[in-house]
Image (cartoon, rainbow, N blue to C red):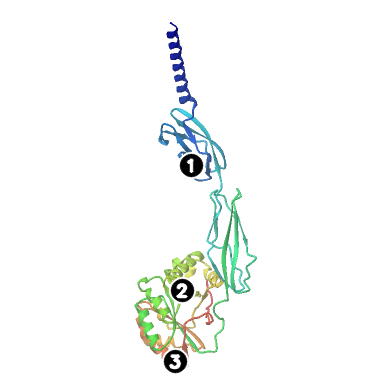
C-alpha cells in the first residue's frame, strides 16, 4: 500500500515536471536570439535576418519580421517585432548615421600663375543622410603668385558629426604662351582634325625638310591614333583640338566643352603619357557657330582654359584648306605663304580629304625656308595668336 502511494506521487511529480518543462520550453525560454548591435545606417537597407544570432530548433526562414514602425530615413529607435513558432519577440532597432560625407571631383588641378582658381568648380559632396552638406576649403597654403605644387584641404561634416578631411593637389604653373612674337623668324605649321592616313604623308614631308610642326588632334579617327605617338616621337608637338568635333556637342555648355576636352586629353595621354596643355578651339576662338548652341560661351572659355593651365592657339596664317575639300594646290600655296610676320602660325588640316594640303606643303615650306624661317612645334614660350572673340 505504501509503495503504491509512493509510485503515484512519483508519477504525478514526473508529469508536473514534464508539463513544467514543456511550458518553460514553449512559453518562457526564448528560442530566438539577437545580436548585441541592433543598428541600421540611415537610408540604408534594413535586413531583418542580419540581427538574428540563433534560432533554436529552426532556421531564420521560420522567422517573420514586422518592421512597419521603422523609418529608415530618420534617426531614432524603433520597435520591431519578430515572430517565431507563434511567439512574438519585440526588439529595438536604432537608425544611426556613422558614415562620413564623400567628396567627388577633387582631382589634381593645374592653374596659371596669378589667377584665382575656382576651387569649388566640379566639386560635389554627398552623404548617406541625403542632407545637403556644406564644406569648407582651407587654401591658406596656396600661393598662386609662385610656381609650385600646393595642397588645399576640404572639410565636410554631416549633421551627425561625421567628418571628412580630403586633400587636393594644386599645381601652379607659369602662363603658357606669349602675347608677343619673338624676333626669331619661325613658322609654326599646325595641322587640325587628324590623325588620318595623310598625317603619315605630312610627317614624311616634314622629315625631309627637318621641319617640326604641331598636330591638334581629335578623337574622330582613332584607328590612326598610333600616328599621334609616332609624331610625338619624331619631335612634333601634340596638341588638343576636340574629341567629337561636333559643334552642337562641344559648345552645348561650358561643362560640355570641358568634358570633350578631357576626353581628347585622356585619349592623347594613352598614346604619349601626358595631357598636352596646348589647345585649339573648333572653329577658332573667333567662331560664331557656337552662338547657336550657347550664347557667350567663347568669352567664358577663352578665360577659363587659361585659368586651368591651358593655352589656346588661333593662327595668323591660313592655307584656307578648310574652305572645302580638294582646294586647288596653287591656291593653298598662295594663301599659305601670305603672312610674313616674324612668327607665322599656319592653319592646315590633316584629314583624309585634304590631299591637296599634302601636295601644297613642300612649296609652302620651301617659300619660308628661302626667307630664312625655321619650322618649330609649339612649346611653352611660343607666341599664341589670339583672334577676337565674337561670342
Ligand atoms: Zn577642326
* Residue at 43% over, 9% down: 3
Q: Quadrant of residue 273?
A: bottom left
- Could you classify mark 2 by the number of other residues whose Cα lies within 10 Å: few (under 14), some (14-19), or many (20 or more)? many
Question: Mark 2 or mark 3, which is nearer the start of the sequence?
Answer: 2
Q: Quarter for ligand 1?
A: bottom left
Q: Which residue is mark 1?
A: 46
Residue at the extreme top = 1
Disc on the earlier residue, 1 or 3: 1
Residue in the picture at 65% in, 65% down? 140
Residue 291 makes an appearance in the image: yes
The residue pinned by badge 3 equals: 369
Label 1, label 3: how far apart the Cα atoms are: 76 Å
Q: Secondary structure at mark 2?
A: strand
Disc number placed over residue 240 in the picture, else none = 2
User: Residue placed at 44% from the left, 66% from the top?
Assistant: 249
Percent position (x, y) of residue 300? 55, 69
x, y percent for residue 255: 50, 64
Task: Give whichever of 200, 97 is nearer the camera.
Answer: 97
Q: CA distance from mark 3 to mark 2?
A: 27 Å
Q: Residues within 10 Å of mark 1 (few under 14, many from 20)?
A: some
The answer, for residue 357, to whether it is visible in the render is no
Select label 1 or label 3 by which is in front: 1
Position of residue 171 measured from the top left corner of the image (x, y, whole percent): 57, 70
Amino acid at each position: 500500500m505504501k509503495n503504491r502511494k509512493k509510485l503515484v506521487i512519483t508519477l504525478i511529480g514526473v508529469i508536473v515536471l514534464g508539463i513544467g518543462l514543456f511550458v518553460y520550453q514553449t512559453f518562457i525560454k526564448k528560442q530566438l536570439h539577437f545580436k548585441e548591435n541592433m543598428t541600421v545606417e540611415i537610408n540604408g537597407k534594413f535586413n531583418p535576418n542580419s540581427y538574428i544570432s540563433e534560432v533554436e530548433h529552426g532556421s531564420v526562414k521560420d522567422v517573420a519580421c514586422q518592421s512597419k514602425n521603422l523609418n529608415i530615413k530618420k534617426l531614432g529607435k524603433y520597435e520591431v517585432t519578430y515572430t517565431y513558432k507563434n511567439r512574438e519577440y519585440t526588439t529595438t532597432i536604432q537608425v544611426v548615421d556613422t558614415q562620413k560625407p564623400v567628396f567627388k571631383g577633387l582631382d589634381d588641378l593645374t592653374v596659371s600663375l596669378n589667377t584665382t582658381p575656382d576651387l569649388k568648380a566640379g566639386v560635389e559632396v554627398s552623404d548617406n543622410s541625403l542632407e545637403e552638406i556644406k564644406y569648407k576649403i582651407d587654401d591658406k597654403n596656396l600661393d598662386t603668385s609662385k610656381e609650385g605644387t600646393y595642397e588645399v584641404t576640404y572639410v565636410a561634416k554631416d549633421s551627425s558629426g561625421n567628418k571628412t578631411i580630403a586633400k587636393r593637389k594644386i599645381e601652379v604653373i607659369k602662363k603658357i604662351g606669349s602675347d608677343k612674337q619673338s624676333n626669331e623668324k619661325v613658322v609654326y605649321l599646325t595641322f587640325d582634325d587628324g590623325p588620318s592616313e595623310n598625317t603619315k604623308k605630312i610627317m614624311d614631308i616634314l622629315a625631309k625638310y627637318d621641319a617640326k610642326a604641331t598636330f591638334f588632334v581629335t578623337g574622330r579617327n582613332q584607328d590612326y591614333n598610333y600616328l599621334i605617338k609616332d609624331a610625338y616621337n619624331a619631335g612634333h608637338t601634340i596638341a588638343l583640338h576636340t574629341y567629337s568635333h561636333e559643334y552642337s556637342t562641344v559648345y552645348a555648355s561650358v561643362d560640355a566643352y570641358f568634358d570633350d576636352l578631357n576626353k581628347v586629353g585622356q585619349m592623347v595621354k594613352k598614346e604619349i603619357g601626358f595631357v598636352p596643355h596646348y589647345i585649339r578651339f573648333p572653329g577658332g576662338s573667333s567662331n560664331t557657330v557656337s552662338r547657336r548652341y550657347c550664347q557667350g560661351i567663347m568669352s567664358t572659355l577663352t578665360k577659363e582654359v587659361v585659368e586651368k593651365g591651358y593655352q589656346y592657339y588661333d593662327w595668323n596664317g591660313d592655307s584656307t584648306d578648310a574652305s572645302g575639300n580638294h582646294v586647288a594646290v596653287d591656291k593653298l600655296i598662295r594663301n599659305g605663304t601670305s603672312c610674313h610676320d616674324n612668327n607665322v602660325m599656319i592653319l592646315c588640316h590633316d584629314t583624309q580629304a585634304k590631299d591637296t594640303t599634302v601636295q601644297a606643303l613642300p612649296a609652302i615650306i620651301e617659300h619660308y625656308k628661302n626667307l630664312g624661317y625655321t619650322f618649330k612645334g609649339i612649346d611653352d614660350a611660343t607666341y599664341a595668336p589670339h583672334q577676337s572673340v565674337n561670342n
